[in-house]
Amino acid sequence: MLLAAALVVGTGTIVTKPGAGSGPQDTTEQARLQAAAQLQSLAGDFEVLAAARGGDILADTAALLASQTRLLGPAPDQATPAPSGISAPSDASTPSGASAPSGASTPSGAATPGGAAASVGLGESTRRLAVVSRSLLSTAQDVEPGLARLLASIGAADYTQAALLQRETGTPAELPKPWQYPGGSWAASCTEPGDPPSGASSESAAPTGRPTTRDALAGVVVSERKLAYVYEAALPRLTGTAREEARKRYLQHRALIEAWTGVSRSLCVQLPPAEAAYELPARLATAPGQVLAEAETGAAASLADLVALSAGDLRARACADLLGAVGRIADTAGNVPAAPGLGSAAEPAATGPAPAAS
């Protein structure tokens, strides 16, 4: 929570528009504008689909995308070309209001928010949602910390929602693969634990009192340790399929502890020693499923902090694991938050299947 608060103050969760008299839009502002336009277009398409077809998940997806658009701030007029310097992904389809792929039906009487008739198909819109997710996570690698954190969070949410849509509606269209960590090698070296890592972001040298890359990296490891401990306590209280699925997630968290501990050592970051026991939530005995869902959300927050406080290979790893964390939130909570890991800035807006019974 302290890291999240410091990030909001120090880097800003939402990037504001340049002031009057400022120079040309920089890369970060261009990225924000394009992301807002993409999400606004998709929100309009899903509003049309929800009106024509019905179904809670379509309406919830439209609400999710509208909420994300608001988090990014004002979007440019959809008739305006995308800002120069930022190109849309090569397989992204045209925005709402343009001609749809052949075979897509036009809902009777439906119109986009701008009033123009729309012709949208569920399969194509779901695929576009996954494509936009890849675009946002890719863009997050090269923008300032506050926007990187927001784009990575929204991108992870959008791919998870696309997968839910495909599963719940039976859409046959194949989704593109999710954005993946491209892999890399560490060049860091030090003579003893705690020396400045050569492969870490310049944020590592932030003034005392502000979170650093080391703080965020240690935060991920500690968060995963605590979450694994909660799973160990919750597993005996679960039964059947709920217990089997929880055990799979527990093993994933054990693997994440090892992976991020290895990253920390390679970057010469000294981690706090693991504790024999951690404090357990009070409701664990009566609502283990709900407690696990809340704990998964906390783990996503630690990864989102690391996205903001790192760069290069380290940020890419954090983005990839944030995508996995949002999938676990959906599995446990039954919904996808608009911006996972950003706390109360974005309330859960899209629902999927009900979480497993506790």
Image: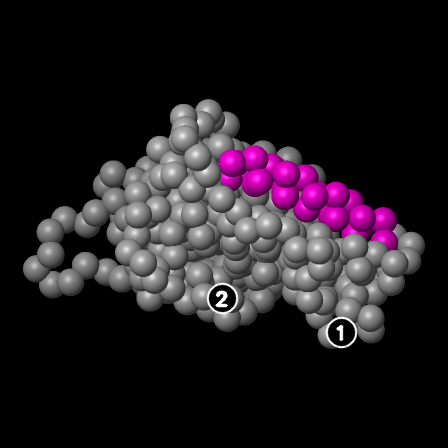
The disc placed on residue 283 is: 1
Task: Decide whether residue 117 is among the magenta residues.
Answer: no
Question: Mark 2 — residue?
Answer: 1
Image-based side of 26 in relation to 132, left or right: left
Is 314 left, or right, of 165 in this rendering? left
Q: Name the residue nearer the viewer: 263 or 300.
A: 263
Q: Residue at x 63, y 51 (%)?
A: 274
Please state if 310 lies on the left or on the right of 62 as rendered: left
- Tell me the magenta residue range: 243-265
Q: Residues within 10 Å of mark 2 (few under 14, many from 20)?
A: few
> Count of labels shown?
2
Q: CA distance from mark 2 to mark 1?
A: 21 Å
Q: Give me the residue at 77% from left, 69% from top.
A: 284
In the rendered structure, does residue 261 fall within the stretch colored magenta?
yes
Marks 2 & 1, CB-CB < 8 Å contact = no
| Residue 39 in the image: above or below residue 101 | below
